[in-house]
Image: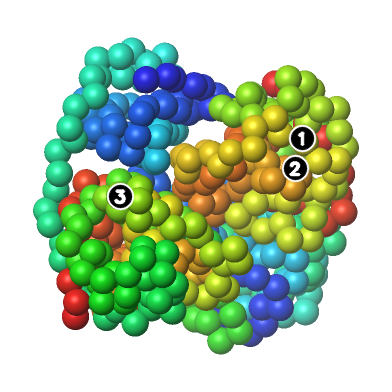
Amino acid sequence: MTVLTVEEAPGPVTVQDRGRRGLAHLGVPRAGALDEPAAALANRLVGNDEDLAVLEVTLGGLTVRAGGPVWVAVTGAACSVSVDGRPAPHAEAVYVPERGLLRLGPAEQGVRAYLAVGGGIDVDPVLGSRSTDTLAWVGPPAVVAGTELPVGAHDGTPAAYDAPRPPRPGPLRVDPGPRRDWFGPDALDRLCGTTYTVRPESNRIGLRLDGPPLPRVRDEELPSEGMVLGAVQVPPDGRPVVFLHDHPTTGGYPVLAVVRADDLWRCAQLRPGDRVEFRRA
Amino acid sequence: MQLIRVGRSAVLAEVADAAAAHSLAVFARRAGVPAGEVVPAARSVLFDDVSDPGRIEELLAGWSPEQPPTGAVVELPVVYDGEDLTDVAERWGTDPDGVVERHTSLEFVSAFCGFAPGFAYLSGLPSELAVPRLDSPRTRVPAGAVGIAGTWCAAYPTASPGGWRLLGRTEVALWDPGREQPALLPPGTRVRFRPA
């Protein structure tokens, strides 16, 4: 069995697949790749089923040594790619020979790059998924220098070409959330009429935004209720948080709106200081 | 019961209390509700990953609130040496032994899980024994800590930050992803505490 040995992992790196389903009632977040289309593209490029696990590389890059020959593909955040020091393309299948050193540079645009390996990252699944949830650390441990990652058997054929997604500029599309009545009648319009900026505390749990606070009309505490992916939750400070894949399964702050699933990948690639706008779907 | 759409693929059903939420969740699962997630909470059940919200609404219309079935009894041995034991004793107008006596005399029911994997919100603390959360949460509460907040009781399955008032600790593994049933106290489980 081929093993990838991690030599350097300066930023957070985790194993992710499409996440864990059906366990929210036990408090288990879904986890899974934050930029789902990028992870799926990386898998397709190396000829994998889209369910196989990839590495999610946050900002800082990654260096791994391949124990055997492997096909790889890097997608998502723009970053340099090299094999044994020679530049290799982004978003294309790349061959790494036995003992080859694959290097992903720091993200130049966006936040999260995805590294797929032919055969998939074959760590033991936990509760039906190989994803690492960073809220409660369900799943495999974070990937750090020295981590050895088993690679599954590869019977797919790398794709010669796959169309990368077109950029979708413009506001994130939202549908109304369940607790609009906790805010003034124009709160959804306010949300959609404001330019927010991404706060540095953003992570896999939520995209935290800065902007003029959304005032509440009700002061009491909301009894804890189930939370959905993409929920725009508004804590007492009035600054919205968009829930991403590691969000807690229940929460006690009112949800004003819900970001469309098709737009969530963009939240995965927004950097601190980037501007964010919403519009009604 | 009131039904609220949450975005395009979820429905939130609001009910009277946690017992009704558990009852509705059990009803919906038995009826084979076409939802990827069924999440009971304090006064609601979330049906998520739903392709046809209208179908969920039709199906839930057949529910009437009834006493939910209760599950097995789990007994948790507790070492009552929590950091807030004397504080809770003062609030309850008793001493630490009095807290132990009252806490071990109650039967709790796991109403729902949330906050962390396997973190069960246990109902059963009478309202006259309700205590507020800490003003400032602790940055780290160890796994196994047993605490109360409002009228809820819980045992922390994993170490985490926490704002509940701590009565003691249990050695029992509340969360083990390697077990067939990873959460020891899924919704519906009855729970009793006893001095270790």
Single out the mark in the foreground, 3 or 2. 3
Q: Which mark is residue B162?
A: none
Q: Secondary structure at mark 1?
A: loop
Q: Quadrant of residue B146?
A: bottom left
Left or right relative to A236: residue A86: right
Q: Is residue B23 visible?
A: yes
Residue at left offset 27%, top offset 37%: B19
Q: Which mark is residue A215?
A: 1
Q: Quadrant of residue B116?
A: bottom left
Q: Which mark is residue A238?
A: 2
Tell me the CA gap for discs 2 and 1: 6 Å
Q: Which mark is residue B126?
A: 3
- Picture layout, residue A182 above or below residue A34: above
Tell me the CA gap for discs 3 and 2: 33 Å
Query: Who comes first in sequence, dot 2 or dot 1?
Result: 1
- Chain under numbered label 1: A
Across and down, in percent, residue A142 comes to 54, 73
Left or right relative to A279: residue B141: left
Residue at left offset 42%, top offset 64%: B91
Q: Is residue A41 visible?
A: no
Q: Secondary structure at mark 3?
A: loop
Across and down, in percent, residue A82 comes to 75, 72
Q: Do marks 1 and 3 both belong to one polypeptide chain?
A: no
Q: Do marks 2 and 1 both belong to one polypeptide chain?
A: yes
